[in-house]
Structure formats: C-alpha cells, structure tokens
Image (tube, coloured by chain):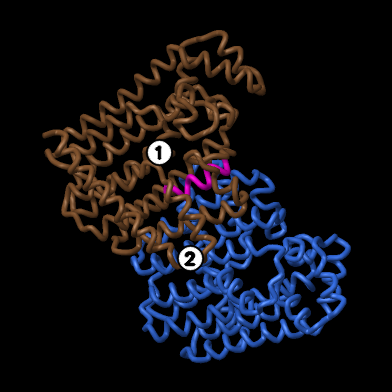
Chain colours: A brown, B blue
Amino acid sequence: MQTVSSSITNIQMTEDLKQVRTVIDDLIKDTPDMIHDMISNLLSCSGKMLRPMMVVLAGRYGDFEAEKIYSLAAAVELLHNATLVHDDIIDDAALRRGLPAIHTIHGSKLAILVGDYLFSTCFVLAAKNSKIQHYDSLAQAVARICEGEILQDTGKFVFDPSVRNYKRRIASKTAVLFSLSLYLGAKESGCSETVCSVFIRIGYNVGMAFQIIDDILDFTGDPKKIGKPAFGHDLSEGIYTLPLILALKDGDAQLEKMMRRQSLSRRRRKKIVGIVSISRGMEDARGAAALYSERALREIGRLDDGYTKDQLLSLTSRLVSREY
Amino acid sequence: MQTVSSSITNIQMTEDLKQVRTVIDDLIKDTPDMIHDMISNLLSCSGKMLRPMMVVLAGRYGDFEAEKIYSLAAAVELLHNATLVHDDIIDDAALRRGLPAIHTIHGSKLAILVGDYLFSTCFVLAAKNSKIQHYDSLAQAVARICEGEILQDTGKFVFDPSVRNYKRRIASKTAVLFSLSLYLGAKESGCSETVCSVFIRIGYNVGMAFQIIDDILDFTGDPKKIGKPAFGHDLSEGIYTLPLILALKDGDAQLEKMMRRQSLSRRRRKKIVGIVSISRGMEDARGAAALYSERALREIGRLDDGYTKDQLLSLTSRLVSREY
C-alpha cells in the first residue's frame, strides 16, 4: 500500500512541477532568442526544484488555487536561479549542476545581466495573480539573501570562529528562501497565521539542516555526484564552514597551526580537508544538522495527516540523508 | 513674478526630494554598517534625481498622497542606482558622478551584490503603500531594461548601422524608466488612463531626447563637467551611437575606412571622435534629439496649466540644452 500511495503522490508532484515549468516557459518565450536560449538551458537542468516543490506542497495544504500557486512556485525558482547565476560569478565556480556556469560560457558581464533579468522576471511572475503582501515578503527575503551574501563575501579569508555568525550567514543564504517558499504557498492557499508560522519554522529548520549538510559534503562528498569541482571548494574560496569551525573549537593543534597561515596552498587545503573529514568537529556538525532536521520533523508532525505532511516528511528524510 | 513663482516651485521640489531621501535613509538604516556606508555614499551624490522628480511631478498632477508617492519615487531612484552599479561593472567605467564607482573601490564581486541589494530594496519599497498593478509595471520595466542591456552587451564591437535598432536600444536603456516614473506618479494619484498615457508619452520622448544628448556629449562634452573619463568612452567600449551611425550613413569615406578596422587604437578613436564631432551626422543627431524634445513639449502642452506642467516644461528645456 505504501508503495502505491507514494507512487501516486509522486505522480502528483511530477505533474505540479511540470506545470511550474510551463509557467516559466510561457514567461520567457517572448524574450529575444539569445536570452531565451541561455535561460532555458539553465532552467532545463534545474536540479532538485526543491523551492517550487515547497510552494506547491504548502499550497496543497490549504485551498489550492493552481494558477496562483504555480506562478509563485515559478517566481521562487527564478529567484533561486538568479542568485545562483550571480553566486557562481562571485565564487568563481566554473560548473553549475555539472555543466559550465553561465559566466563560464558567456563571461561575467553577460552573466550579471542574465541574473538581473531572472530577478525581474521573478517579480513579474509574482505580480500576476498575487497579493501585495506576498510581494513584500518576497522582496524582503531577497534583500536578506543579498545582505547575507555581502557579509559572506566581505568576510572571505577572515576566519570567524563564531558558530552564531555562521548560522546567521546560512540562515540568510538558504533557510530564508526555504521558509519563504513554504510560507507563500500556505498563505496564498488561505492557511491561518498559526499554520503559516508552522510552515515558516519547517522551512527554516529544513533549510539550516540542508545547508549544514551541503557544507559537510564540501569536505566529504564525491565531486562527481555533487556536480562541483574537487571538494574543499569553500575553503579555497575563503569560506569557513561549520565542520572546520567545530574542529578548531575542539582544539586540534595541527589544524590550528595550518589555519594560521596567510595563504593556503592546494596541498595544504587537501590536508585540512583530510583532517576535518575525520575530526570530532565533523561529527558535531552532523549532530547539528540532525538537530535541525529533528526540529523540522517535529514541526511537520504538527500538520494534519495527508499529502503535504507525507511529502514533507519524506522530502526532509531524503534531504538529510543525501550524499550530493 | 516668474522668478518668484519659479523659486516657490523650486522650494517645493527641493522639499519633495528631501522627503524621498528620508524614505531611502529610513529603509537602509537597519542594514549592516558596511552595506549602509556603501549605499549612502552612492546615493548622497546621486546627481540629478530626475526619475524621482518625475514620479513626484506626475503625482502632484492628481490626488497627491505624499507617503505613497515618496515611496514610489524612492523605489525608482533605488532601481536606477541598482542598474548604474551593475552597468559600471559591465562598461568598465571607473568613475560615477566624478567619484570612483563602487566596483572600483570594492571590486566587481561585491558590486554585483550591492546592485542586487538595491534591486531588492526597490521592490521592498514599492510593496509599501502600493498597488499590485504598479508592481507589475515596475517589474516589467526592469525586465525590459535588462533585455536592452543584454542586447547592447552582446552587440558590442559589432557595428550595426540601423537607426531603428539604436532607438530600440536606448528606449530600453533610458526611456522606459522615464515613462515608468511619470506613469507611476500619475496612476498612483488617480489620474485617468488618458492622462496616464500622456505622461507615458512625455516620459518616452524626454527619455529618448535625453539619451541621444548623452550620446552626443560622449563626442563633444567636457569630461570634467560630465564626470566620466575622456570622451569617446562609448566608442572604446564598442558601443556605436547615433552621431557615428548618422555620420557613416552620410557617407564619410575616411570614417568608413577607419571603422572597418578590427580594433581601434586610442589614437584612432580620438580621430574618429574628431571627425564625428564636426560631421553632418552630428547635426542630424542634434536634430533627432530636438524632434523628441519637441514631441515631449507638445505632449506636456496637453496637460492642464499649473505646477506640474510648468516644471515639466522647464525640466525638459534644461535637459535638452544641457552640456553635461
């Protein structure tokens, strides 16, 4: 029975995401060929589509209005892609989802504009069928994401041992958009403020767990599966994440000595990755991710039984046990 | 009497723009210090503030609601500054308003994020006190501006002799935002669709005249007054504007020969600037600017007598006779 029911729900989700793609395709079909091709390529390999999935799942908890929910889901996906295009320039990331990033193919200048274009289409979409209050949430979230990115960028190569600052950074970077996605879906489908708050907390906790696991995988993941260049990438960019912060907190003298160096050679970085991977700090980072996912599961438990609850439970389990 | 009345209206405009600045200051006062400082510096020397001026002028034609109009005016100014920050990276422009551009001081990567942040604050502001329809216009305008920029960027160093394509490019680059500014002010203050259309046409024609004059000044202007590096800057960036297009259309053989070269040395560019400056094409470009400004004045003539009409007439005259 479980198999049958899960395959039914998967069909539902596949169909929903197909509709979200149609909304995006319709929006960009009138853009000049060149822009259209760049954006289609980016979006056609758009990975997990986690954020639109969340809009739809929360949307199906209330009074589901297909057109509105699909528009918001598409807006959130476009926003996510806009930030990715700019992030890849900023992080010098040559690959995105295993393929060359837009700036790798077309240069940084054009990539800046493509990112801007995606930002604006996100707001065009959100303006269709939506309420001004949602607009406010969306824009505030974007501002918060940018703030987080600016703080991350200006803090590069400056080792900050504060777990609190790390959490603040990843909250802006990831958890804000997860929260927003679930909130928009719930709010648009007429859920009460109390229910909306539950969705916001689910999004926050799933987002925090998701990002910590991402940061763990940068030390331990298989580069082929992640679709990014060799591991230790954050380190090479001067971004110091939780496993390293906790390993240093744990007082590893060798690690501390290595981190004191002004510049980290490739060989030295590889060594640091090796040390952190098997450190107590890595275990503690896994523990932190587990804590956030437990909180997420607890919040999901507050929802009424049904499709949304089942899917969110399964999504959260998949996200926290993933290897890429 | 004229002097007294004009000084009264100037006091009014100065006061309005002060209020617009207060809205922006209030919005960014809670951002982290570093971001706050960068943005304040940019906005404190924010030049002519033409676009917020237009929102306010159209807003005063109808049922003026200060809070809403100031929010929209501030949103438009933030949007304009967001595009400038990104444009300066893309055009390799070291100076902005005579001072080092953000990317010159903080690097391109941070400048991308500051631009994104300004974009998002624009939408945050517009969501306050505004209608969802305005949001749609705003977002569509941004998308159109980005489209224009992408076309301009991909067309760099490709000489396109089409006046039509040139006009399309500057419409997206400049006229769209002028139109939008006047439209938002008029619409928000309850003007009829017919009146709103008049404002849209005023904005379009003033914007076209303004940009053609900008392009003329790139050949003939005094670099010190313009606050940009040596003239011929567009040419060095591979952007071919109306004076050059028309000079070539006029069949200047020497010019044609020079433009056929793959790369333009600094000496050659200087020579081209010299030829174009005194060409028939330059006269024709001035004629084109005059035509747009006449159309703008004719449309302004349709408005009822009063403050808005007086100010728009004087603003248009100042813009088309400017030397910087």
Magenta range = A80-90
**Residue type highlighted by circle 1:** Thr
Q: Earlier in the sequence, mark 2 or mark 1?
A: 2
Q: Quadrant of residue B263?
A: bottom right
Between B172 and A28, the one lying in front of the other is A28
The quarter holding residue A95 reads top right
Query: Residue at coordinates 17% horizontally, 50% vertically from top-left?
Result: A62
Which residue in the protein does label 1 denote? A174
Q: Identify which residue, B295 or A219, lies in the foreground.
A: A219
Question: What is the x, y in percent for residue B43?
Answer: 58, 56
- For the residues labelled 2 and 1, the Cα–Cα distance comes to 29 Å
Check the image and report above or below for A110 versus A273. below
- Which quadrant is the N terminus of chain A positioned in? top left
Count of labels shown?
A: 2
* Residue depicted at x 35% and y 25%: A289
Residue A88 located within the stretch drawn in magenta: yes
Q: Is residue A66 left or right of residue B100?
A: left
Q: In the rendered view, would you say B105 is above or below A320?
A: below
Q: Main secondary structure of the magenta part?
A: helix
Name the spot of residue B80 as percent of width and height, x first: 55, 62
Amino acid type, residue under disc 2 in the picture: Thr
Q: Which residue is mark 2?
A: A31
Image x and y of residue B284, in percent: 73, 85
Q: Which chain is mark 1 on?
A: A
